Amino acid sequence: MRAVRLSLHRFDSRFRTVVRHASAARDRTETVIVSAHVASGETGYGEACPRAYVTGESIDSIKRFFHRHRAGLEHQVIGLASLLDWRDRHAEEIGANPSAYCAIELALLDAIARTEGVGLDTLLSLPPPVGEHRYSAVLGDSPWLAYRFQLQRYRRAGFRDFKLKLSPDPRRNQGKVAAFRVARGNVRVRADANNLWPDAAACIAALAPLD
């Protein structure tokens, strides 16, 4: 791959509805896009979605990581092997900034694959995707009427896999789960507590009534 130039952009867009869960309520995206522009004309793109309540990262911390390492990456990364070498030499700092590196790595992998005219699976020596792929619908910790309306819309659209954001209120959680028990057809539901409980014992005690 010929010389690469990295750039960073913030993508800010409002949601149609507020997304609520135990750790936050969000009404807009919080996303960073990194572009990797290759001298031969190809451009790769990567995305970071920092979450302070998950990894401690923010838009500002991603910007700092990006600007601290941009020149080195542009100078040193000329292909997959050099990217992996850079990653291994900066493993500790990447561990503290996973979202920041995610956007950069995705952009560079995309650019390298486009330059070589292959897909990411081929570039990384992975088997190609085959078979049926399912999408999961996410149900936030919304007020009851909004929750029921959203669930019904997802079911009408054909969704069968759901991720359910749990609430600090056990009765709310029981009502959410009960709504699935009366729904027709087979559905698969997994719960997302978003750091709701301090330890495993509290988690088990809260989840037991939902079984």
Image: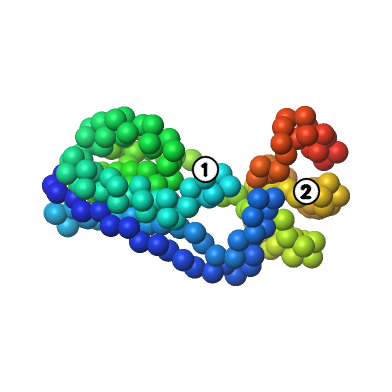
Q: Residues within 10 Å of mark 2 (few under 14, many from 20)?
A: some
Q: Does 59 sit above or below residue 197?
A: below
Q: Residue at x 59, y 65 (%)?
A: 27
Q: Residue at x 57, y 67 (%)?
A: 15
* Viewer-nearest residue: 50 or 114: 50
Residue 10 visible, this orientation: yes
Q: Position of residue 123 (x, y in %)?
A: 28, 37
Q: Which mark is residue 106?
A: none
Counting labels gives 2
Q: Does 171 sit above or below residue 145?
A: above
Q: Position of residue 26 (x, y in %)?
A: 60, 61
Q: Residues within 10 Å of mark 1 (few under 14, many from 20)?
A: few
Amino acid type at image mark 2: Pro
Q: Which of marks 1 and 2 precedes in the sequence? A: 1
Q: Provide the secondary structure element on which disc 2 rests.
A: loop
Q: Does 166 sit above or below residue 203?
A: below
Q: Does 83 sit above or below residue 155?
A: above
Q: Position of residue 209 (x, y in %)?
A: 86, 38
Q: Disc 1 designates what residue? A: 55
Q: Which mark is residue 168?
A: 2
Q: Provide the secondary structure element on which disc 1 rests.
A: loop
Image-based side of 165 in relation to 3, left or right: right
Q: Quadrant of the N terminus?
A: top left
Q: Position of residue 170 (x, y in %)?
A: 83, 46
Q: Residue at x 17, y 44 (%)?
A: 75
